[in-house]
Image (cartoon, rainbow, N blue to C red):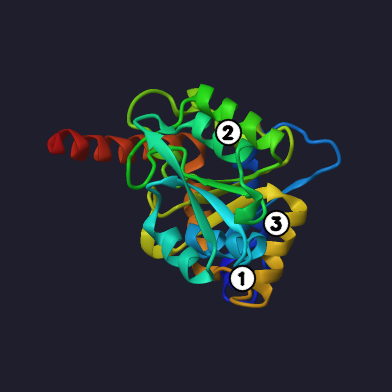
Amino acid sequence: KVLEEALQYSPTPGLPALNEFLWERQLKEHTPPECAGVERALTITQGSQDGLSKVFDMLLDSDDALLVESPTYSGSLAYLQPKGVSLIELETDEGGLIPERLEATMRNWDSANGARPKVLYTIPTGSNPTGASLSLERKKTIYEIASEFNLLILEDDPYYYLRLEGDRKQHPSFLELDTDARVIRFDSFSKILSSGMRLGFVTGPKPLIDRVNLHTQASNLHPTGITQAMVLALLQHWGEEGWEAHLENVCNFYKTQRDHFL
């Protein structure tokens, strides 16, 4: 039955069974807090990059400014720079984005430079290209600053499951801290299953996810059905234990590569 569905046009947010499976995983993994009057939703995309580009289009015009880590992911820059968006670079160190730099940028914003930024783009785990990861303390501080200045946080987290030291669940995501419904989270299967599958998913406030779905309806209709069916069958076959065992194997592989490099 799933294969039959996969070979036909499917709902824009993805195959219902896979969408529900991933939604339940997000609830279990990140336990996002309830936000009064704001629902959350999830949509499946053709890789995380597809979701990112659609959210960039949704939130940013050519005269807008976007807060980004310096340095940040070249793939995002390649999409943003032709849009003419002003990229406001924020200093990082071995611990990732420095909260004080974010606060100073927002508090001392010169209106001559245009409207104050409304969006922060961050890669909180194993940032590309620096490899830095934000601590829980820094995440909390950044979230407080975002709340004060009404910033949306784009949490691009494709390396979340690839933590090489310690328990990943001891490092809560921005989604887990999101009491104001200001986080849009991007996940990817590229680093943990296959980059060629081109499958990712976006989680965030339902009104914004609905807009991403409208973008998809007007562009690629929905993510590829066959890829979704493959991933769904694999996740169902593995179950929770199999999934965790697979993640452990992947982390061990990358840990070996790192140790050889060092």
Mark 1, residue position: 222
> Residue at the location (45% across, 29% down)?
168
- Amino acid bearing label 1: His
Q: Position of residue 113 (x, y in %)?
A: 60, 55
Q: Position of residue 85 (x, y in %)?
A: 54, 63
How many dots with numbers?
3
User: Is the Cβ of the residue at disc 2 closer than 8 Å to that at disc 3?
Assistant: no
- Amino acid bearing label 3: Ile
Question: Residues under labels 2 and 3: Cα distance?
Answer: 28 Å
**Horizontal side of residue 130 vs 4, given as left or right:** left
Give the mark, 2 or 3, whose residue is nearer the N terminus.
2
User: Is the Cβ of the residue at disc 1 closer than 8 Å to that at disc 3?
Assistant: no
**Tag 3's secondary structure?**
helix
Q: Residue furthest front?
A: 112
Q: Position of residue 50 (x, y in %)?
A: 52, 64
Location of the C terminus by quadrant is top left
Q: Which mark is on residue 209?
A: 3
Mark 2, residue position: 103
> Dot 3 surroundings within 10 Å: few (below 14), some, or many (20 or more)?
many
Question: Residues under labels 1 and 3: Cα distance?
Answer: 14 Å
Q: Which mark is on residue 150?
A: none
